Structure formats: C-alpha cells, structure tokens
Image (cartoon, helix red, strand yellow):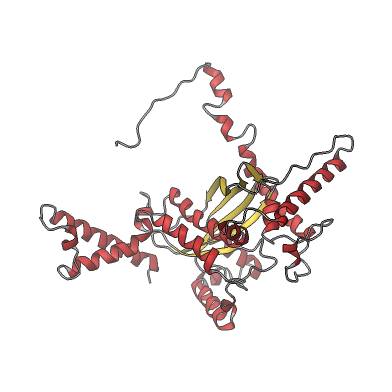
Amino acid sequence: MPAPWVYRTLTSITTLTLLTGILLRNRTSLHPLLHLFSPTASPLNFSILLIALYLNAKSLPFIWHLRFLRIMYYQLYLQRQPLPVDALFRPIITTNLYTPLPECDYNGHKSNSTYYSDLDMARLALFSCILRKGIRARGAHEKGTADDDKAWTDYHELLAKEERKRNPDAPALPVPPPPPKKGTFMIGLGAVSCHFKREIKPYERYDIWTRVLAWDRKWLYMICTMVKAGTVVPEGWALQPWKGGSKHLARQKAKVAEKHSEESNAHANSLPGQVEQDLEYKNAIFASSIAKYVVKKGRYTIPPEIVLRNSSLLPLRPGLSPSAREADLGAAPDWWTWDNVEKERLRGLELAGKFGALDGAGGLHDEFPVSRPLRGLSGKLDVLGEFSDLWF
C-alpha cells in the first residue's frame, strides 16, 4: 500500500494541472477570475481551487508571517500551563509539518533552502515558550526590575572572582553598571547551520525537536532535529499534561509500533533492544541544525546566564542569594542542581564551540573576498565573471 505522501502528491499535481488548464482555456475570456472560480457558477473549478490551496497553503505569500504570529501569540498569551522548574534542557516538538510541491526542487524532494523557514518556527516556539516571562514583562512596558539588576551584578561579580583566581596578580575586573531602564529588548539570530542526512519526500510528515544546547558569555545555542513524524513518543508533556494519560500514551505507542513493525522485525534477531531503538531513531533523522542567539537591550549585550536566571530557568548558583523571583519557585528535583546543569552546559559547549569558532578570527568572514593563500598566487583579484540571477 503506498505511503500517504504519495496520495497527497498525486492529488496536488492533479489539482494544479487542472487549475493551469482552466486558466489557459479561459485566458481570452471576459469573465473575471472571481466568476471563473465562483462556488455557484463553477462549483467544479471552485472545488479544484480549494483542494490546490489546501495542499499548498504553506507556500502562499505571507504564510511565514502568519505562522510566526500564531506561534508567538499562543505561547505568550494562550499558554497558561506553568513551566516546570527543570524546563531548560527539555525539547519542544513542532509537529504537523510537510513539504508541499512548491517547496520541492528538481529532484522531487524538499529543497534545501526551505528547511530554514521551518527551523525558524521551531526555534521561535522554544524561545517564546521558555522566555515568555521576560517577553511578557517587556510587552507590559516593564523597563527593568530590581531582580534584573541583581542578576546583572551577581553575574559580573562572579566573573571578577573567577578571573582573580586564575590571575591573582592581574588587576580586578570592574563590575559594569546594569543596562539602563530604557532600551529596546531584542533577541537576534547570529548564525544558523543545517546538516542534511536524508531527503524529505513531498507531503511526507515530519517533526522538529528543538532544545537548548549550551551557552557562553554572549551566545545561546539551540539545536533542532528534523525527524520522521511519530518516531519518538515522549513519556511526559509538561505543558500538555492531558496527553500523559494512559489511553493517549497507549494510542501513540501503538501507532509508532505499527508504523515501524517491519523495520523492527528486520533487526529483531541481530541487534540488542536498546541498540536497535537508537538505530531506529538515527535512521529517522532527516536533518540537524544548530543556531546561536544573542539578547540585546539597547546597545548592551545581556549574557545568556542572566537571561535564563531572570526567566527562572536555572538553579541557584552556589554563593548567591536568591532574588525575590527565585524565592517564589517551587521545589526542584534532587538532580536539578547547579553542578549538573553546568556539566550539561559544558558538554553541549564542546559541540557549540566548533560552530561558534567559524565567526572568530580566521573564520568564514576572513575568507572574503578571496582566501589569502590563493590570492597570493596571482597577486591580484581576478573573478570568472558577473551574471544576473533575476531578470527584473
């Protein structure tokens, strides 16, 4: 039996072909398009138009903006479930994604350039979810609080202490004053990279798992993984507790078991259970992406640790007293300690550091206009030519 994406692809091709034929057949007609596709005058044409729009709505103009606004508004104003204390490294799953025909390239699968628009939505969902407390405050015209100033001062005082331990003879680092109360709060994307593993067929469903990977003094790193829809069934949904019911969980696991039964049977006699499951997860990956963000208030760069602390996402760092905001947090699991969070951050930073180094000295930007060793061969800047992409 063909996969569902095959039927959707054939339907989309058929409706788009019929639409093209209708427009070409009536290209000299005096009837306006509204009459040509009227539900009363031309119900068949109207039905074809609706099906074509439904199957390819993701590629229509301004749909990216509508998706952006819907995700942002939902997470900021409609999501009432409180975040768990240990929410920082938990992934958020963006579901119900597919590739309409206009997103496909000449090979008949998802074009590489279209991955980034889906990744935008996945990262937005995580950001607006875990940082909603701070974003809501800025939306309510709150220009800074005593907790914000305390987090800023605590962070830079700790940096100064650590620097004195490393270099006892060096002069003490000054603690900069907190950012001014007034200033535009902005979250900016600094870089993004996508690494492709498997093709995504037209109308094939996929999910994006997005989570915080690590952070340093300037950048917050996030990682996204595009996987075949329904490959992994979570054991808990912090913001959707109703999904954790035994009936819903049983149905989800049954779907996954049925979907992958043939692959599981193929490896049942050759691989241990855990190895088989890990292999199944890796085989379901379509692509992986890493991105880094910076948070600004006016011209000030806010270190990610301060941003996360002000959003109540970090356990209390040893040597610090809790702020009024942190004192109101609920009980945390025993394993949710600063040491464990720091270990996970450093583990992720090993990977993120390789990505971040591309922006440093001797990185990608230093390769323009021509890498120095090659330019040194001829001593002048020669090019092959200049050719226009667009003709308008």
Q: Is residue 272 visible?
A: no
Viewer-side residue, 352 vs 46: 46
Residue 366 horizontal/vertical position (percent)? 58, 30
In the drawing, does residue 188 fall left or right of residue 179? left
Residue 382 horizontal/vertical position (percent)? 46, 20
Residue 100 horizontal/vertical position (percent)? 37, 59
Q: Residue furthest right?
A: 169
Viewer-side residue, 228 vs 63: 63
Vertical relation: 329 (above or below) 295: below
Task: Name the quadrant containing residue 355.
Answer: top right
Q: Residue furthest bottom?
A: 247
Residue plotted at (57% across, 35% down) = 364
Task: Name the quadrant containing residue 334.
Answer: bottom right
Vertical relation: 53 (above or below) 186: below
In the picture, which quadrant includes the C terminus?
top left
Vertical relation: 121 (above or below) 391: below
Viewer-side residue, 75 vs 123: 75
Q: How many marks?
A: 0
In the picture, which quadrant includes the N terminus?
bottom left
